[in-house]
Every structure is written in structure tokens, then in C-alpha cells.
Image (tube, helix red, strand yellow):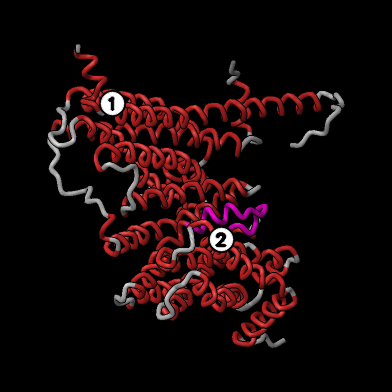
Amino acid sequence: MSNWIPLWLHKLSSPPTFYRFAGVLRPWALALALVFGVIGLYGGLVLAPPDYQQGDAYRIIFIHVPCAWMSMFIYAIMGVSAFVALVWRIKLAEVVAMQSAPIGAAFTFITLVTGSLWGKPMWGTWWTWDARLTSELVLLFLYLGVIGLYQAFEDRRQGARAAGFLAIIGVINVPIVHFSVDWWNTLHQGSTVNIFGPSKISWDMLWPLLAMTLATKFYYAASLFLRAQTDLLSMESGKDWVRRIAASEVDQ
Amino acid sequence: MNALQVFFAMGGYARYVWPAYAVFFIVLIADSIAPRLRRRRELRQLRARMARQEARSAGCILPTPSST
Amino acid sequence: MTRPGLTAACGAMLRRDLTLAWRRRSDIAMPVLYALIVTMLFPFALGPEDALLQRIAGGVILVTVLLAMLLALDAMFSSDIDDGSLEQLVLVPQPLAVMLAMKILAHWLTTALPLIVITPLLAAMLHLPASVIPVLLLALLLCTPLLSLFGAILVALTAGTRRSGMLLALMLLPLCVPALIFAAGAVAAAQQGLSWIAPISWLAATLVLTLVLAPLACAVALRIALDS
């Protein structure tokens, strides 16, 4: 009974099938992202009470934390699909890995900027060399390295494999960076800011956070589907199914 | 101060909170526009190529060599 | 036809690369000159106070050596790609990873070793106390092979592209953060009279692990980059 899943996956990984599949799911993902986003923003900016220590500045959490989660989640997706692409040479896995990179870089960038906007009023500094912050910065460089390597190749599939390999090396590296910066911080005691103490978050603040997390997840899905569709169009531009789409979709 | 002004003041932290949200939306909007533009460009190029091929198969001689 | 044994092949590979490097001796001197000049700039930029220079000396030397190695890294496979001998290397019956390890060793001997040799001079320029210099040399001895090995993977990945040194820097430097932290940590600990065994042990452990894995990864990367 159990071989319909590999069969279905195999069928899904053919470009025209995935193109249609993504086209069907994308509006739903985008709509869910907008709904959850509006709910989360309303809950976070209007309904949630001000924090008794941080006042209203803590409201940055509703975008900062979901984006930080997404930056790691997308990297994990990229690493796994790069691995699948390298081992089984599935074209779709290459597309997913490479099209995830810009979205992940965008989320990482947002995380860094909002974190520093949050840090200024709270700890009095835009930046501190804490392990989390440094790992996040290294993560951004890794994303940019993956994108840069992918684009340096003339042959797109070869570029995807090479950049995917770099992404896998990065998966090993990010925890090591985190650990080494932690170690480094114990050496330079003076400069550490104890930012992430154990704290209980109340339900009023938690549910908007969860709603925003879902919103960013669905946004990623929608953006990935659109990017993957576009990439498949240009990759398969000689094929009949793409020509039919080009002929049927006359814009402007 | 009315309620709206209080809301926008963010308890004195407006100049940190609103730029953070602005960055969030600007980056994500840019992220969703970029593939749309690329898609339009790809399709336009493809249609141009299809038109060239059709013209060639109809027997015209094109002045430029096609790079398909 | 008898095929040469692994040791013979390794020896031949090493000899070839070292001979090629020796024929272009000026290339070996370039990273050394670069490191000297960069180190010379720091006192002019920061002022000649002994205390300040001593404090930053370890870090400055490590970063300078890192950048000098980065400059030389691009050349690791480039001449072999240009004359096609790298593709021949992929086809040899001996394991590619071992052959690449020999190439990396040759590259380390011709770029990192000269840098380590002049390190006491750099340290003297920045007034680093003489007692710290052995620790600095030990840290460099463990840290530079790491850079060569990591760098080799990335250079192999970019083997099929239009050459771009900036891309290499973008990829390599984030990966080097842990090595730099531990090397600088050892030097700082020695300077403060603390025990520097822990960071040196971490570096050594990382080096052993990388020594085993990096040639394999480099071989995979090279096959990806040359496969077209």
C-alpha cells in the first residue's frame, strides 16, 4: 500500500506537474499569509498590552522572532533539498534549494535590521558580538555566498549543485560558529550583554507571535512557489508546456 | 492626545518600532515583486523567440542569427 | 602495465607542484610582501603607542595572514585548470581525495609556510612580547592548514566559473570565523599569562577532523565543478 507516496512525489517532481501544483497552491498560501499577518499584526500592535519592562518597544518581537525562525527554517529546507539534489539529481530539488536562498537572505536581513532597531532602545547599542547575532550575520553571508556561487556558473544546473554543496558545508559550520562565539564571549566577559534571559511570555503576546510565525511560513511558501515557477519557465523554455504557457499568457 | 496618536507614538519608541515594521514590509514586498518582473521578462523573451522561429519556418530570412 | 603505488603517486604529485611553484618563485614572495606591507600600515593608522600595538598585535597578524592566504588561494588550481591537467588528475586511478590532499599540502608549503616564517618579524614590528611568539606560531601552524583545506573546497567549487576572487572571500571568510576565534583566543590567553591549552586543543581537534574530511569534500566539489 505504501508506494503511492514515492510515486506521487516522483510525479510531482516533474516540472510541468509541479508548475501546475504550485500555481494552484500559491494563491491559497498567499491568502493565508495575509490573513494570519493581519490577525497577528492587529493582535501584536493593538491588542497586546505593553511590556512592563520594555514598554512598547518589545512589539518589534512580532516581526523579529518569526523572521529569525524563518531564516533558520529556510536554511534547513535549502540544505535538505540541496542534499536531495546532489544525491538523487532531482531537478526540482535544485530549483527549491536555489530559489529558497534569496527568500532566506531577505528574512535574515530583516532579522538583523529589526534586531538592531530593538537593541538600541533596550541595551543601548545597535550591535553586540553575541553568539546569536554573530551566527545570524554569518548566516546572511552564507546565503549571499550561495546566491553568488549559483550565479557565477554559466550552466544553471551545475551552479545549483555547486551552491548546494556550499549550503551543506554551511549547515555544518553555523553551529560551530555559534559555539565558538559563545566560547569567545566567556573570554571577553566585559562585553557580553545578557539579553536572552529566561522569560515567560503571556498568552496575549504569544498568540500574535504564533500568528505572525504562520504568516511568514505561508509567505515563504507563496514566494517559493512563484520563484520556482519562474525558474522552471526559464529552465525549460524549449519545452512545449512552457511554450503553451507563454502563448496563453499575454501580459500588459 | 487621541487614541490614534497614542498608537502611533508607541510609548515613545515610535522611531524604533515603525522603521522595523517598514523594513519588514519593504523587504518582503521587494522579494515578491522581483520574481514577478523576472517572470514577465522570461515570458516576453520566450514569445519573441517563438515569433522568430515561426517567421523562420515560414520562409523569411532573418537579418540576425538566432541564438536558440 | 603496472600502475604506480599510492605513495609513489603522492610523491610525484607533491614534487610536481613544488617544482612548478619553485619555477615561479616571485609568486611565493607576493603573499609575504603583502603581509609585511599590511602590518606596516597598522602602526601608521593607529599610532605608535606600545601598549596599543601589543594589544592588537595577535589579532592583526592573524587577520593579515588570513587575507594574504586568501589572495594566494585563487591560484591553487587555476594553472591546472588552464592547461587541463586537473581534468587528467580526476581520471587517475589513485583516489582523487589523496591526490588533492597532496596538492593542498604543496600549496600550504608554498604560501602558508613562508608567512609563518616571517611571523616573528611581523610580531616584532608590532612589539608583541617575545614570550607570546611561540604560541602565535603554534596557533598559525594549526590555523593555516585549516584555511588551506577550507579554501581548497571552495576553490574547487568555483573551478568551473569565471574567476572571481571576491566571491571566494565572501564564501571563505564566514567559514573561518571559528578558526580565527580560537587562534586569537590562544594568543590573547598567552598574552594575559593564562593557559592557552584549551583553544589550541580545539584548533588541533578541528584540524584533525578537517584533515580527514576536507580532501573528500574537495574531491566531491571538484567533480561537481568539472562535470558538464
What chain letter is assigned to the residue under label 2?
Answer: C
Residue B14 shows in this picture:
yes
Start and end of the magenta stretch? Answer: C155-173
Instruction: Give the image quarter of residue A171.
Output: bottom left
Q: Which mark is residue B14?
A: 1
Above or below A19: residue A249: above
Find disc 2 in the rendering and name its residue: C41
C191 lies left or right of A160: left
Residues packed near mark 1 inside 10 Å, few (<14), some (14 to 19) or many (20 plus): some
Rendered residue at 52%/30% (across/down): B34
Estimate the x, y position of residue C41 in percent, counting from the top left. Answer: 56, 60
Rendered residue at 68%/64% (across/down): C78
Q: Which mark is residue B42?
A: none
Q: Amino acid at mark 1?
A: Ala
The image shows a total of numbered marks equal to: 2
C170 lies left or right of A111: right
Above or below C6: residue C34: above
Tell me the SS state at disc 1. Answer: helix
Rendered residue at 46%/60% (across/down): C175
Residue C220 shows in this picture:
no
Tell me the SS state at disc 2. Answer: helix
Estimate the x, y position of residue A66 in percent, counting from the top left. Answer: 30, 38
Between C74 and A90, the residue placed more toward the observer is C74
Between C45 and B49, the residue placed more toward the observer is C45
Residue C165 among those drawn in magenta: yes
Q: Report, in whole angstroms, how far the alpha carbon at label 1 lies from the one at label 2.
A: 44 Å
Above or below C179: residue A79: above
Q: Are marks 1 and 2 in contact (CB under 8 Å)?
A: no
Between A239 and C34, the residue placed more toward the observer is C34
